[in-house]
Image (spheres, rainbow, N blue to C red):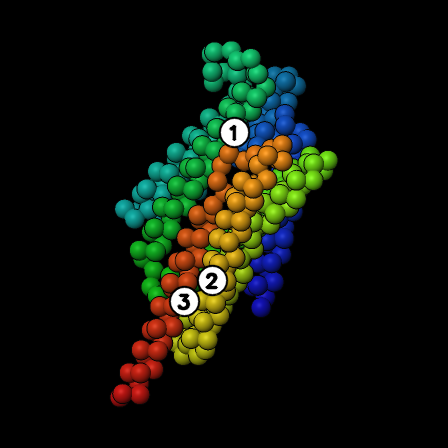
Amino acid sequence: MMKKITLLIACLGTGIFTAALAVLTRHFPNLFSSIMTFPFEQIGCGLGVLSKTGSLGNGAAVAAWIGISAIPIIIALRYKRSKETLWERVSLYVLSAAVLLALYGMVNPQLFHAVPFDNALEFLKLIKTILGAGVWAVVVLYLALRLIRLFRQGNKEQLLKYMQNILYILCILFTGAAAISIINGGIALMDAAQAPADAGFGVFHLIAELAPYVFDNIIILRLTDLLGIARDKKQEGIAESAGRVSRICCLALGITTALTAGSNLVQIALMRHLSNISVTVNIPVISIAFTVMVLLFSRLLIENKVLHDDNDLFI
């Protein structure tokens, strides 16, 4: 129960934080170009201001720039030097280089392209976003390599624990994505307040966009209960718990796909009356794939339990 309360607090905090970032990117674009640039753009802004305070400030800015960039290298040096951790350590060295380059680019984005553009401000924001996304891509690479090593070396109990922790992280990420959708959808609704068709479709579209995230988090909470039972040697109530997961997955698949289809069909029906038409088809592929995989996992556990009980009766 305590873990669930902690998870809910973490999700709430993440939702508020990401919503705040989404608002800041709209109202303070010079300091918050996009969510992908956080926190490197803000650190770069601070370093840029510090470097302009004189020779002492410039030296402190350079030292801070190098020191922050060296953090992944320090983590890599603390690793045990073994063949299993080689690629993790390499990715940390790459991450240090990426942070070093990104922070420099946040302070001097104009140096990353020689050709002048008409809309210079938008182009500089694009450069910062690319730099921030590059750093986060290397972070994801490091985490993936670490997970691969842990999965290859873990036993059954450890693997179930890793899976539970990954589900917690997914729950937090889904909450953050939902918060961003709420902010963007709310702003779109305020812009369409004078157009009834746009406002009505906007509400329906926002519900269709949020539904997958809501169901994903409900499924995760149910699945963590199931994994807790699976980690127990007795596994009492595993079939019932797997059945609950299976039912919520079926409900999520039906409602999510129905809302997605409905949203796109409603847009087609109201196209003549809408002032803003989305040219992208909004299909939550990741949520649908996640739900299907969890559904299959829960059904396999149920069938495995039934087979185990049949074997016990036969014996």
Q: What type is the residue that disc 1 sits on?
A: Thr
Q: Going 70% across and 36% down the picture, which residue do you hit?
A: 195
Query: Which of the labelled discs sits on residue 249, or is there none?
Result: 2
The image shows residue 215 at horizontal and vertical percentages of: 53, 57
Mark 3 or mark 2: name the one nearer the start of the chain.
2
Q: Quadrant of the N terminus?
A: bottom right
Residue 66 in sight in this render:
no
The image shows residue 138 at horizontal and vertical percentages of: 42, 37
Mark 2 or mark 1: name the one nearer the start of the chain.
1
| Residue beneath disc 1 | 129
Q: Which of the two marks, 3 or 1, is nearer to us in this view?
A: 3
| SS assignment at label 3 | helix
Q: Going 62% across and 56% down the picture, which residue do you hit?
A: 9
Please indicate whether residue 49 sits to the left or right of residue 107 in the image. right
Task: Give the residue furthest to the right.
Answer: 194
Query: Which of the labelled discs sits on residue 298, or is there none?
Result: 3
Q: Going 64% across and 22% down the picture, which residue do you hit?
A: 49
Query: Which of the labelled discs sits on residue 104, or is there none?
Result: none
Q: Which of the two marks, 2 or 1, is nearer to us in this view?
A: 2
The image shows residue 91 at horizontal and vertical percentages of: 37, 38
